[in-house]
Image (cartoon, rainbow, N blue to C red):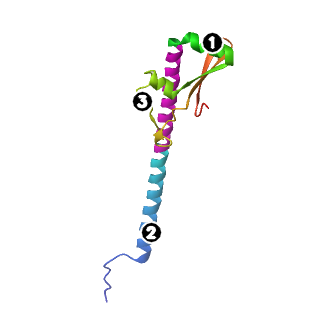
Amino acid sequence: MKISKNGFTLIELLATITIMLIITTLVTTSILSIKNKNTNKQYNEYINQFVAEAKNYTKDNKNLVIENINTTGYYNISLKMLYDGNYLDDIPINPNTNEKFSSNSGVKITRVNENLEYQYIENLS
């Protein structure tokens, strides 16, 4: 007597589903890792842009910046100031929050041994 096999056994189906779940998990993890790296890269590029434009602002307003640093020890340049001064075309969207960077965030300038140091600050208040 011949037994005909017209389908998959339960074990074969479970094994296939398990392998598919493992592959899906690996692919999803890889995609999320790539997305996070790209988000961090884009965020750092924006920060570098803010610092570069703060340096341009400092060149254009050197006396004001130096006078304030000599008086208070620092000078803050908000993103709003950079935008209003046409150093930024727009206040970009923060890739970490998917909202615009706060116009109150910006770059703090201090003097360290006769050199100016620029540091991005999330909230200048």
Report the front residue among 85 and 116. Answer: 85
Residue that appears at 69% across and 13% down: 113
- Residue 110, percent from left and from top: 64, 19
Q: CA distance from mark 1 to mark 2?
A: 73 Å
Secondary structure that dominates the magenta span: helix
Say which of marks 3 and 1 sits in front: 1
Query: Amino acid type of disc 1?
Result: Glu
Residue 93 picture location, percent across and down: 45, 37
Q: Of tags 1 and 2, which is closer to the observer?
A: 1
The answer to whether residue 50 is magenta is yes
**Image quadrant of residue 115?**
top right
Q: Are marks 3 and 1 in contact (CB under 8 Å)?
A: no
Please tell me whether mark 2 sits on a helix, a strand or a loop.
helix
**Residue at the image position 44 percent from the left and 58 percent from the top:** 24
Q: Which residue ends up furthest to the bottom in the rendered image?
A: 1
Relative height, residue 35 to residue 49 (above, below): below
Q: Quadrant of the C terminus?
A: top right
**On residue 67, which mark appears?**
1
Residue at 47% across, 54% down: 26
x, y percent for residue 64 = 57, 13
Instruction: Decide: few, some or many residues near mark 2? Use Cα within 10 Å; few <14, some 14-19, many ≥20.
Output: few
**Which residue matches tag 3?**
90
Of residue 110 and residue 3, the one placed in the foreground of this image is 110
Residue name at image x 30 percent, y 79 percent:
6
Question: Disc 2 vs disc 3: which is toward the camera?
Answer: 3
| Within-10-Å neighbours for mark 3: few <14, some 14–19, many 20+ | few
What's the residue type where badge 2 is placed? Ala
Name the side, left or right, on which 4 lies relative to 75: left
Q: Which residues are magenta?
A: 35-58
